[in-house]
Image (cartoon, rainbow, N blue to C red):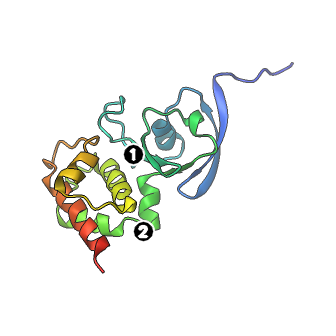
Amino acid sequence: MLQMPNEDSAEITLDVNGETVTRTVPVRRHLVDFLRLDLGLTGSHLGCEHGVCGACTVRVDGVVVRGCLILAAQVDGAEVVTIEGLSRSGEFAVLQREFEQRNAAQCGFCTPGMVLTAAELLESGVVLDRDGIRDHLSGNLCRCTGYQSIIDAVEAASKAQSAP
């Protein structure tokens, strides 16, 4: 009997945290669900599922995006970096240290999104004051810290990075 292709699923191949991954996924599966359910990468969280809270933040081809707003099938061929990949590479070691020292990761739910967004800012090389940092992180919501410790951590990491 002739098998018809399943139009409800798609085969995708992408680079996730430096590893090539090929999977067949439901076409309506969001990227963050794919990362969590199919790959076991649970660092990115589901919060609002509307792209407002930033808990699902990941990098796609070097750009910070909301994983709850993108379908996994849309990133076929892309490079995806999650908090796990950023951690393994040591890319944000200074930022991680500053978050830890300033208790900027209280419950930890928002932390992956905050760190990925802050790392994007630090990589840009733009030195911002506290208001600029606050503005850059404004798409990431935190219910625990009141943001001051997060701003402190990003500011300290920025200063450490730009020190001679």
Quadrant in the rendering for residue 122: bottom left
Q: Secondary structure at mark 2?
A: loop
Query: In the image, what residue occupies the spot 50% across and 38% down?
Result: 31
Q: As displayed, is residue 112 above or below residue 164?
A: above
Q: Nearer the viewer, residue 91 or 133?
A: 133
Give residue 44's mark.
Answer: 1
In percent of width and height, residue 124 lies at: 38, 59
Residue type at the position of mark 2:
Gly
Q: Nearer the viewer, residue 120 or 101?
A: 120
Q: Which residue is mark 2?
A: 90
Query: In the image, what residue occupies the spot 42% across and 34% down?
Result: 68
> Outermost residue, bottom direction?
164
> Outermost residue, right direction?
1
In percent of width and height, residue 84 lies at: 44, 56
Quadrant in the rendering for residue 125: bottom left
Other-residue count near label 2 (Cα within 10 Å), few / some / many at <14 / 14–19 / ≥20: few
